[in-house]
Structures are given as C-alpha cells and as structure tokens.
Image: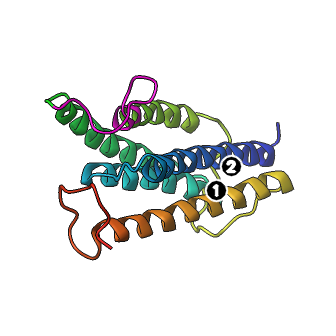
Amino acid sequence: MERSEIIDFTRLINALTLIGISCILLFAFVAQIALWELPCPLCLLQRIGLLAMAFGFLLNMHYQIRPTHYALSILAAIATGIAATRQIVIGALPPHGYGYPILGLHLYTWTALLCTATVIYTCILMCIPGQYQLTHYDRPVEAKSSVVRWVCHFAFSFLVLMLIGNVISVYLECGLMECHGDFLTYKI
C-alpha cells in the first residue's frame, strides 16, 4: 500500500467515526423529540463531550493526521465517560434511572460504554503505520480519492448540523440562563 493510500484509508476511518458520533447525537435528538426526553445538564455535558470527541477526528480529516488530534479525542472520551459514570451513579439511587432504557440500558450508560470503546479504538487507530505526515506547518489537505473526499465532506456537514441542532436545543430548553434541574419543559 502506498503512503497516500494509507493516509486516504485513515482519513476514511476518521470520517466514518465522525459519522458514527453524529448518528449517536441524532439518536439523542430523536429521543428528545419523539419521546419528549429533554436532556438534563449532565446529558448536555455528555453531548458536548461527544462533539469534542468528534473534533479530534475532524482535525485529522481536515488537516494532517497527528497523534495530538487522536489524543484530543481520547481526552474528550475520558472526560465524557466520567460525566456518564457520574450519571450512572446518580441513576442508581431511587427513582432508578432517567429516561427510557434502550436494550435494557439508559442513554448515559451507553455513553459510558461508548467512551470506553472510543479510547480503545482510538489507541488502535494511532498504531496504523505510515499515516502521519510530520511537517512543521498545518494546512488543509484533500484526500486523493474522490470517494474519501465526498465521505469527509458529508461527515463534516453532518457534524455541523448536529452542532447547530444542539445549540438550538439548549437555547430552547434553557434560554440564555443556566440550565436548572427542571428539564420537563422548554423555557422558550
């Protein structure tokens, strides 16, 4: 495999990971709208953490692939996992859990499992040889394959759409004030 093929392959993996994270955020929106499960402040923190995890993969797609970009995703996954674990501990107290369980687990439990898997997955991704282009400057770099370019552009657009949706959702739920414990109705 040539170096450019390895880099395109790694970019494609980063784009697919970004699409996966965006799908998780979309699923949270569907639960919020269809099941009327407004996110609590810890849920909002976990959504921000998912966006931060995606940001590391986005940097790899748009700029040159770097270990520091992977490290950003790993640190975001650890921080998000801590927030999800805190919510698991809170949910263990009566009344048990918040929201509808999906396959027997609440969304925050799935988030904790996802964060653990993301740390392991990203560490494995970091080990792909020949993916790093170590230069002294970072500039946007396009993939050589048109399919990989299309997938990267789609992944970026999907993530931006989820980011805008989250900002609007938080504004409708909390307004310009701090989000309080009453997450049963929209403020706006």
Residue segment shown in magenta: 95-110
- Farthest residue, direction top: 104
Q: How is the image coloured?
A: rainbow
- Farthest residue, direction left: 94
Secondary structure type for disc 2: helix
User: Where on the picture, by quarter, is residue 109?
Assistant: top left
Report the residue marked by disc 2. Answer: 11
Residue name at image x 29 percent, y 60 percent: 185
Residue name at image x 36 percent, y 46 percent: 75
104 is within the stretch colored magenta: yes
Residue name at image x 17 percent, y 32 percent: 95
Q: Quadrant of the C terminus?
A: bottom left
Density class for disc 1 (Cα within 10 Å; few <14, some 14-19, many ≥20) is many
Q: Amino acid at mark 2?
A: Arg
Q: Kindly indicate whether the residue at mark 2 contacts the one at mark 1 (C-beta within 8 angstroms).
A: yes
In this rendering, the count of numbered labels is 2
Q: Which mark is residue 61?
A: 1
User: Where on the picture, by quarter, is residue 128?
Assistant: top right
8, 38: nearer the viewer: 38
The alpha-carbon separation of the residues under discs 1 and 2 comes to 5 Å
Main SS category, magenta section = loop
Residue name at image x 59 percent, y 43 percent: 20
Secondary structure type for disc 1: helix
Where residue 159 sits in the image (x, y, percent)? 57, 59
Q: Which mark is residue 120?
A: none
